[in-house]
């Protein structure tokens, strides 16, 4: 008797989210199969996308080998973003670190003006993140949303503590929301349910928190895997959103990545590759050489 | 369904103060209200009782027995307190609880034999909580065999599968599902044993106002899977109505949800929809979140 491999067919479809406008836009998500299950029925119209991170101030704690590739642009986030563009990314990720009250507490207006300037000077979609301080982000993110009105950016992190105000601003100014919850599938779903009550589900991206190799990556892996399975297999309406793995910052915080360049690239690269296997739809990196390493690794031969 | 009233519990500040100050009135009121609400047993959970152990337990049991005729469940991990409690009981008490842990087998199970009382035996062993149905069955069979050897008949044994909070990331929901399976096959592997659960544990960590939804629905689901008794809050009126078979249409609705029947949600009342949604979460069909009633 001839052996026939079983072929699964799934009912869930991850929502397709468009970031940016017109020819400068990208799409993420849209798959109706589990990550890399090419042997099953279904397809992924939008292979994983990559972004490089730009921060809004000279990085105080980055190791020399991470600073090196951006040495001449570190003082100017606009130039830095353009440099990323030249390096062949799909999107630029701008983190407004300086707005953090514990860093520089720079103003929401300055941050918004900068976000707008960066968005206008690149031909790529922009992702903007506040500092993650949920109270300060309530001031910063609505200003960013307003300044970049109608540009359809991806803005976050939208959190349990501030989703009402931030979500409303994103909705009013036509942006996508990146919903962040702390490594917990139940909290992740709760935030999506609550945000989804007034914010269109097809404009929500999940940020489940991406821990680095050796620092809890397996939790992030299992979580992403589970989000995908529950969305694709059991068709849970509130987990069928694309996932962003914001991992560069986590990796370059580690002692191992700071120690030397090769180790750093591998640390970021292995984390990225693992989370890509778990089902991330867009990956945020810091080092351009990691980017080319991962692209080379995942290229279809 | 046999309900063991859980409200005399040392975690409640009023209870611990009353015990310390020997204020019988507070304790007796708690016993009375639970009795009036329809409880079948009164649980006495007074913690480790490091000081004046025997005297305190004796006082407590006497005080409660003045206020109610219900049998008592003596809930302590301290074997000295346990023996003092069992000794003072007028009616056949429930020893709550023993387990497959070495120390418990040595110190608690012999008491159940000595006083010929009912005994709760949990699936816990020295290795911790068995992670799946098979290992739970395996561990309880071992412990029950040991109890039988001591002369405790199956009829006196109330097996506790140990409920975990559903809100525990990832794992919690898996356990609510596998405990249903466990209870369903328990009777086949250990004929004659009874069962019990700490019902409120399921909803631990869930926003306070939402906890009764989980407790009530899960009780019906567990009962369908042959659960004999539950340690629960008898002051929850709706829970008691369900436990005493006074809400047959809700019970039927939960059973239909368990069977995966297609239900016409728009035709149901809000309360009915909430029972359906809760049952779906407890059977693992939808992913749990604190907003489960809202989605």
Image (cartoon, coloured by chain):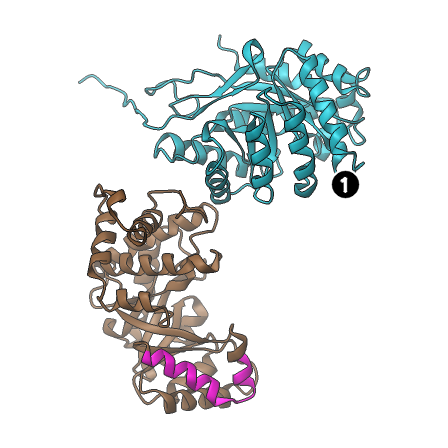
Chain colours: A cyan, B brown
Position of B103 with respect to B138 (left or right) is right
Element marked by disc 1: loop
Q: Position of residue A245 (x, y in %)?
A: 57, 29
Identify the magenta region: B16-36
Position of B173 with respect to A217 (left or right) is left
Q: Is residue A190 above or below residue A43?
A: below
**Does the magenta-highlighted stretch encompass residue B30?**
yes
Quadrant where the N terminus of chain B is found in the figure: bottom left
Q: Position of residue A155 (x, y in %)?
A: 61, 28
Residue A240 picture quarter:
top left
Q: Position of residue B249 (x, y in %)?
A: 20, 57
Q: Main secondary structure of the magenta part?
A: helix
Q: Residue furthest front?
A: A172
Quadrant where the C terminus of chain B is found in the figure: top left
Name the residue located 25 percent from the left edge and 61 percent from the top edge. B223
Q: Residue furthest left?
A: A1
Position of B218 with respect to B211 (left or right) is left
Residue A100 picture quarter:
top right
Q: Nearer the viewer, residue A77 or A149?
A: A149
> Mark 1 = which residue?
A101
Position of A234 with respect to A3 (left or right) is right
């Amino acid at each position: 008797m001839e052996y026939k491999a079983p072929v699964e067919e799934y009912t869930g479809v991850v929502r397709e989210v468009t970031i940016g406008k017109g020819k400068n836009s990208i799409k993420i998500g849209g798959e109706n199969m589990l990550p890399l299950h090419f042997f099953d029925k279904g397809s992924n119209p939008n292979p994983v996308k990559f972004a490089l991170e730009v921060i809004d101030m000279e990085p105080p704690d980055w190791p020399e080998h991470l600073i090196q590739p951006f040495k001449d642009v570190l003082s100017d986030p606009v130039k830095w973003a353009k440099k990323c563009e030249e390096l062949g990314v799909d999107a630029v990720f701008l983190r407004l670190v300086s707005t953090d009250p514990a860093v520089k507490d720079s103003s929401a207006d300055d941050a918004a003006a900068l976000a707008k300037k960066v968005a206008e000077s690149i031909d790529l979609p922009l992702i903007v993140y506040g500092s993650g301080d949920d109270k300060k982000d309530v001031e910063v993110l609505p200003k960013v949303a307003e300044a970049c009105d109608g540009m359809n950016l991806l803005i976050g992190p939208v959190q349990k503590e501030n989703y009402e105000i931030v979500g409303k601003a994103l909705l009013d100014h036509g942006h996508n929301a990146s919903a962040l919850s702390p490594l917990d599938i139940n909290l992740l779903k709760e935030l999506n349910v609550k945000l989804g009550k007034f914010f269109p589900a097809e404009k929500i991206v999940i940020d489940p928190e991406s821990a680095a190799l050796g620092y809890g990556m397996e939790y992030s892996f299992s979580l992403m895997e589970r989000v995908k399975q529950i969305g694709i297999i059991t068709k849970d309406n509130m987990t069928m959103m694309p996932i962003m793995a914001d991992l560069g910052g986590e990796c370059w915080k580690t002692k191992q990545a700071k120690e030397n360049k090769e180790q750093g690239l591998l640390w970021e690269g292995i984390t990225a590759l693992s989370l890509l296997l778990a089902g991330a739809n867009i990956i945020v990196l810091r080092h351009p050489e990691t980017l080319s390493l991962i692209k080379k690794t995942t290229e279809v031969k | 369904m046999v309900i063991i009233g859980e409200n005399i519990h040392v975690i409640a500040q009023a209870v611990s103060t009353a015990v310390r100050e020997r204020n019988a009135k507070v304790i007796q009121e708690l016993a009375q209200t639970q009795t009036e609400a329809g409880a079948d047993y009164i649980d006495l959970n007074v913690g480790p009782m490091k000081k004046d152990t025997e005297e305190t337990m004796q006082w407590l049991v006497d005080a409660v027995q003045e206020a109610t005729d219900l049998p008592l469940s003596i809930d302590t991990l301290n074997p000295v307190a346990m023996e003092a409690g069992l000794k003072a009981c007028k009616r056949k008490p429930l020893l709550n609880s023993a387990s497959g842990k070495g120390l418990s087998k040595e110190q608690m199970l012999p008491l159940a034999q000595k006083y010929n009382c009912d005994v709760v035996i949990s699936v816990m062993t020295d290795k911790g909580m068995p992670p799946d149905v098979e290992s739970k069955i395996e561990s309880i069979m071992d412990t029950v065999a040991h109890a039988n050897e001591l002369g405790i008949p199956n009829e006196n044994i109330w097996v506790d599968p140990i409920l975990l909070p559903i809100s525990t990331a990832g794992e919690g929901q898996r356990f609510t599902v596998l405990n249903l399976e466990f209870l369903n096959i328990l009777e086949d592997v250990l004929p004659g044993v009874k069962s019990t659960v700490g019902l409120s544990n399921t909803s631990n960590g869930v926003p306070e106002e939402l906890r009764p939804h989980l407790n009530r629905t899960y009780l019906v689901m567990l009962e369908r899977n042959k659960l004999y008794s539950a340690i629960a809050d008898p002051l929850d009126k709706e829970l008691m109505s369900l436990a005493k078979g006074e809400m047959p249409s809700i019970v039927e609705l939960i059973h239909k949800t368990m069977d995966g029947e297609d239900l016409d949600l728009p035709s149901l009342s809000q309360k009915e929809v909430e029972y359906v949604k809760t049952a779906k979460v407890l059977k693992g069909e939808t992913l749990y979140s604190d907003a489960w009633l809202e989605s």
